[in-house]
Image: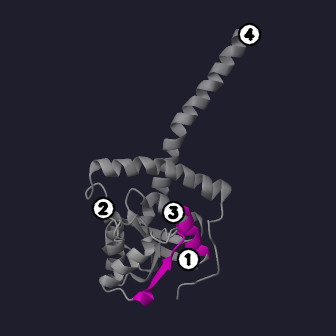
Amino acid sequence: MRNYYRRWRRIALILLVSAVAGPPALIAYVAASTSPHRYTDPAEVPAEPVALVFGAGVRRDGTPSPMLADRVQTAVQLYQMGRVRKILMTGDNSQVEYNEVAAMQQYAEDRGVPAGDITLDYAGFSTYESCYRARVIFGVEQAVLITQQFHLPRAVYTCRHLGIDAVGLGTPDWEAYSSKVVSFYTMREFLATLKALWQVHITRPLPTFLGPYEGIT
């Protein structure tokens, strides 16, 4: 009987250690596997057909949040450098009074990007859905993803496992925002990355909305 309980205590200890050590190892795997595909210098980003810009909230007056403005400004910079030919802006427009992509479009147009080179995805409610819809609805096969550095590994990993040959350009985070703000998003990213692994490898859920094909030309 003593050996029986000893055996189960050992099994319980192994399971506990796995539960504690497993998630950090998975996070490290996502970071390491996407490292060759992530950049911080726009000049080093390879030319791609499309820049995919993820939503990041708008203010009450409908203008982009600081993080979103940084993302769109970086896309504008890549466009002006000739690194991308089109910009796909993906975000949340689930309510009439809340429209991330319209704010992103206006910001880019005010800085010289023609409306004809901007495509809007109004149903990019999450990173997973944005990547899924970019490939299936908008026909994106190659892209540079633009988001803050803390979010970039998950974004690149998700898009690459959903069929997009993606690289990523990280906008500033720790050097641009308070440590309190970035710490919060970094901790949230930990859980979001585990969810992304579950989605791309296990469940493969459909997005909230699909719809007809709208290829970017």
**Mark nearer the N terminus (2 vs 1):** 1
Residue 13 place in picture, x, y as percent: 59, 25
Magenta segment boundaries in residue numbering: 115-136
Q: What amino acid is labelled 1 in the image? A: Glu
Provide residue 3's location: percent of width, then percent of height. 70, 13
| Mark 2 vs mark 1: in front | 2
Q: CA distance from mark 4 to mark 1?
A: 60 Å
Specify which label sits upstream in the sequence, 2 or 3.
3
Q: Mark 4 sits on what residue? A: 1
The mark nearer the N terminus, 4 or 2, is 4
Query: Can residue 70 be seen in this snapshot?
Result: yes
**What count of labels does the image hold?**
4
Which is more toward the observer, 201 or 187? 187
> In the image, what residue type sits under mark 4?
Met
Q: CA distance from mark 3 to mark 4?
A: 51 Å
> Three-letter amino acid code at disc 2?
Pro
Residue denoted by label 2 = 172
Q: Please state which of the two labelled residues, at mark 4 or mark 2, is closer to the viewer.
A: 2
Q: Are marks 4 and 1 in contact (CB under 8 Å)?
A: no
Q: Read off the residue under disc 3.
A: 127
Instruction: Tell me which label, 3 or 1, sits earlier in the chain.
Output: 3
**Distance between the alpha carbons at the discs numbered 3 and 1:** 16 Å
Badge 1 is on which residue?
A: 141
